[in-house]
Image (spheres, coloured by chain):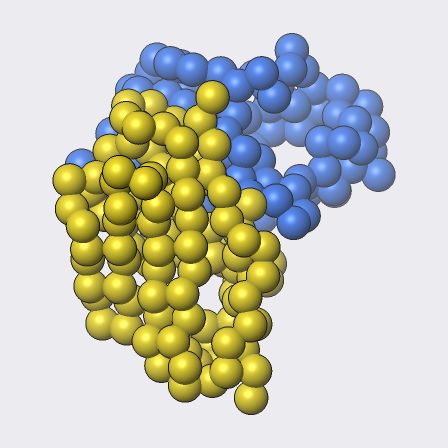
Chain colours: A blue, B yellow
Amino acid sequence: DTGVSQDPRHKITKRGQNVTFRCDPISEHNRLYWYRQTLGQGPEFLTYFQNEAQLEKSRLLSDRFSAERPKGSFSTLEIQRTEQGDSAMYLCAITGMNTEAFFGQGTRLTVV
Amino acid sequence: GEDVEQSLFLSVREGDSSVINCTYTDSSSTYLYWYKQEPGAGLQLLTYIFSNMDMKQDQRLTVLLNKKDKHLSLRIADTQTGDSAIYFCAERGDDKIIFGKGTRLHILP
């Protein structure tokens, strides 16, 4: 148990559809991050929140991507009009009060 | 911009020590992490070190940090078949965490 729950674990969607992923931090934490990981690559930073505030967004986060954290606890990542290039593992992470950074198991998205 | 570099592959005989190396560019990094990822799984935090430390040991794992050269290493003593995975080095400054591409550790019998 890493203290981060992600849902769903797997998502298959048709190109052009919208998808939404959810991240639920269980442990006490400071910041919440979203990353994307494709095969053979390390995780790439997308965005992060401190409480409700979205403090930074990567250039990877096109206009089709939006992340929210309405009450400073769980977060959602939505991808609109999905493309095949969006197929990847989407990872959520939290940084704890003691500086460790824990990741959830990820949501694997396949766009067909 | 910030960058983290790792060699892509390492082969080690079972029982030997594995040493995985990493270099980073951000001189303001405050924390450096090592993660393990097995096929189809998420990232498991193995250990981390503050930038004001030179070394950290945790059972079979030893982390060495040379801040002057921005070089980080992870030594796994008595490497076992269960250590076969991809190992990611990551650095964190004031904001985001930046990852390397990962080193695939292959264990030879």
User: Which image quadrant for residue B30?
Assistant: top left
Residue A93 appears left or right of A72: right
- The answer to whether residue B28 is seen in the rendering is yes
Q: Give the residue displayed 50% in from the left and 82% down from the top.
A: B13
Q: With respect to residue A42, does B76 lie above or below?
A: below
Q: With respect to residue B76, does B66 lie above or below?
A: above
Q: Give the residue displayed 78% in from the left and 37% down from the top.
A: A111
Q: Quadrant of the C terminus of chain B?
A: bottom right
Residue A38's spot in the image, x, y percent?
65, 42
Q: Give the residue displayed 35% in from the left and 60% down from the top.
A: B74
Residue B14 appears left or right of B32: right
Q: Nearer the viewer, residue A77 or B84?
A: B84
Q: How many marks?
A: 0
Q: Give the residue displayed 52% in from the left and 25% down from the top.
A: A46
Q: Nearer the viewer, residue B27 or A31?
A: B27
Residue B10 appears left or right of A109: left
